[in-house]
């Protein structure tokens, strides 16, 4: 799943770092309860137990956006869990790395790719 999103990002990302996959995006306001990251992605966990994933690919030359756990933020997202619910055995869990797996309610991917900074 993550590989598919990364591939779509590489193919369809324009110079403004906006993901365009033909899927309708929506804007959500969420309170962040935790932030995780791995080599390729930022993973934001919301108060409603949703996951918002944002790619790190191509962000090395972007200005850092400060983000604080416990604050509310607005994200333009592409709802991913709605794209793959045709499978009746859909497991709502996200592998952050080899040792951490998160269960979630809804899964989104940010449409605008940004570089994030936060206190670890």
Image (tube, rainbow, N blue to C red):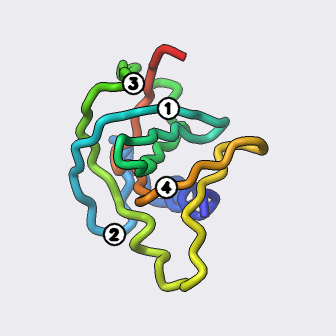
Q: Name the image quarter holding residue 26.
A: bottom left
Distance from the alpha carbon under mark 3 to that under mark 4: 18 Å
**Label 2 with label 1: CB-CB less than 8 Å:** no
Closer to the chain start, of discs 3 and 4, is: 3
In the drawing, what numbered circle is on residue 35?
A: 1
Closer to the chain start, of discs 1 and 3, is: 1
Residue 69, percent from left and from top: 39, 24
Say which residue appears at 62% left-offset and 41% top-offset. 40
| Rendered view: 71 above or below 113 | above
Distance from the alpha carbon under mark 2 to that under mark 1: 25 Å
Distance from the alpha carbon under mark 1 to that under mark 4: 14 Å
- Relative to 14, 28 lies left or right: left
| Rendered view: 84 above or below 73 | below
Distance from the alpha carbon under mark 4 to that under mark 2: 21 Å
Q: Nearer the viewer, mark 1 or mark 4?
A: 4
**Label 3 with label 4: CB-CB less than 8 Å:** no
| Rendered view: 38 above or below 120 | below
Distance from the alpha carbon under mark 1 to that under mark 3: 7 Å
Q: Secondary structure at mark 4?
A: loop
* Location of mark 3 (residue): 69
Closer to the chain start, of discs 2 and 3, is: 2
Circle 2 crowding by C-alpha within 10 Å: few under 14, some 14–19, many from 20: few
Closer to the chain start, of discs 2 and 1, is: 2
Q: Nearer the viewer, mark 2 or mark 3?
A: 3
Say which residue appears at 34% left-offset and 70% top-offset. 22
**Label 1 with label 3: CB-CB less than 8 Å:** yes
Q: Nearer the viewer, residue 56 or 47?
A: 47
Q: Secondary structure at mark 2?
A: loop
* Location of mark 2 (residue): 23
* Location of mark 4 (residue): 104
In the picture, which quadrant includes the N terminus? bottom right
């Amino acid at each position: 799943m993550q590989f598919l999103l990364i591939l779509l990002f590489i193919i369809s990302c324009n110079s403004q770092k906006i993901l365009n996959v033909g899927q309708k995006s929506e804007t959500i306001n969420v309170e962040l309860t935790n932030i995780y990251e791995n080599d390729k992605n930022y993973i934001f966990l919301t108060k409603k137990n949703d996951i918002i994933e944002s790619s790190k690919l191509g962000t090395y030359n972007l200005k850092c956006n400060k983000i604080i756990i416990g604050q509310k933020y607005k994200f333009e997202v592409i709802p991913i869990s709605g794209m793959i619910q045709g499978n009746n055995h859909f497991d709502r869990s996200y592998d952050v790395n080899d040792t951490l797996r998160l269960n979630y309610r809804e899964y989104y991917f940010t449409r605008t790719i940004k570089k994030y900074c936060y206190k670890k």
